[in-house]
Image (cartoon, rainbow, N blue to C red):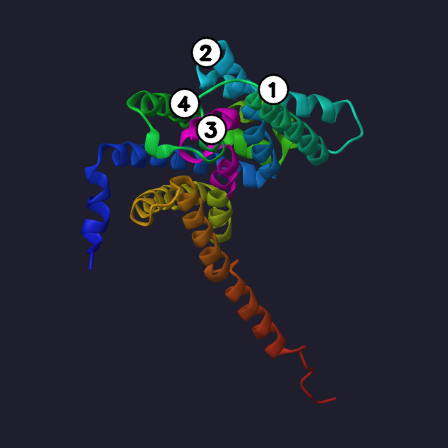
Amino acid sequence: MISMLDWITVPLSYPFMQRALIVSLMVGAVSAVLSCYLVLKGWSLMGDAISHAVLPGIVIAFVLGIPLAVGAFAGGLSCALLTGYLKENSRVKEDTVMGIVFSGMFGFGLVIFTKIETDQHLSHILFGNVLGVTVRDLVETAIIAGATLAIVLVKRRDFLLYCFDPNHARSIGLPVRVLHYGLLILLSLTIVASLKAVGIILVIAMLVAPGAIAYLLTDSFERMLVIATAAATGSSAVGTIASFHIDGATGACIVLVQMLVFILAFLFAPKRGLLAVRARRQADAGAGPATETPGHR
């Protein structure tokens, strides 16, 4: 029976697995930090929208012969700006606008993808191809993820106040509009950095699950950042190595491990877990209504 040490070291004896693990860890770290803000802001659907909207940008970038990351970023940012414009200039709610915009852009991307001749596999774009990461891809992801992570951490308090109370942030002089679109730009960059690892479809899980896990486990935002990063990077490492042993899709394995961690947090979180909530309810029910103790008149 294979030992735990061999289970870890055997896959990492291959250079392609080493590159896959490094990319997965970088993507996990930057996605986790941004995930905390998306969960607090209620922007999970925005991440989904932008991740789908990058497809036409990728295809157009391929046709024009420019880096795919540039096209992906342009597509994601276009989705964010168009969503904001339609929300501000119509009666339609934001979630409805996002659904219309991202589905339209995703459909447009699929149409033009089928009309061009390319050796690119659509499955690699949709679900990632982390095992095919090259050294150039590694450097590109490191630059994008590193810059995004640095900006988020430096401005984390401003972003936090904006997510919690935009009106208060505006009243104390913070540039709310800049923070709004800055967060959308960082979200687009994170999705671009994640494409190689998990692809368009699965990136939404990377942008939601870590923050949701941490939200269940702590009330402190600083600890939330740490827990989310630990959950995301740990899941990335376990999922990448597990995919080697079971010969499964690496991005999907990473997401499945994150979902397992979320289920465990949902059940066993000390204060917000399902078991803890049920125990408190049973204790409250057992105590019953306060009864008046007979006394002297």
Q: Are marks 2 and 1 in contact (CB under 8 Å)?
A: no
Identify which residue is drawn at 33% across, 34% down: 131
Residue 178 screen position, x and y as percent = 58, 20
Q: What's the distance in space between the residues labelled 4 and 2, CA to CA?
A: 17 Å
For marks 4 and 1, give the one nearer the viewer: 1
| Magenta residues (range) | 186-208
Is the magenta region chiefly helix, strand or loop? helix
Looking at the image, the residue that sits furthest to the right is: 91
Q: Which mark is residue 144?
A: 4
**Closer to the camera in the image, 216 or 222:** 216
Q: What's the distance in space between the residues labelled 2 and 1, CA to CA?
A: 17 Å
Q: Callout 3, which amino acid?
A: Thr
**Closer to the camera in the image, 292 or 204:** 204
Identify which residue is drawn at 74% across, 34% down: 93
Q: Which numbered disc, 2 or 3, marks the residue that appears first in the sequence?
A: 2
For marks 2 and 1, give the one nearer the viewer: 2
Q: Quadrant of residue 114?
A: top right
Q: Are marks 4 and 2 in contact (CB under 8 Å)?
A: no
Q: Which quarter of the rendered picture does the C terminus lie within?
A: bottom right
- As drawn, is 29 to the left or to the right of 52? left
- As drawn, is 34 to the left or to the right of 134? right
Q: Which residue is mark 2?
A: 66
Q: Callout 1, which amino acid?
A: Ser
For marks 2 and 3, give the one nearer the viewer: 2
**Pointer 3: residues within 10 angstroms few (<14), some, or many (20+)?**
many
Q: Quadrant of residue 60?
A: top right
Q: Which residue is mark 3?
A: 190
Identify which residue is drawn at 50% across, 33% down: 126
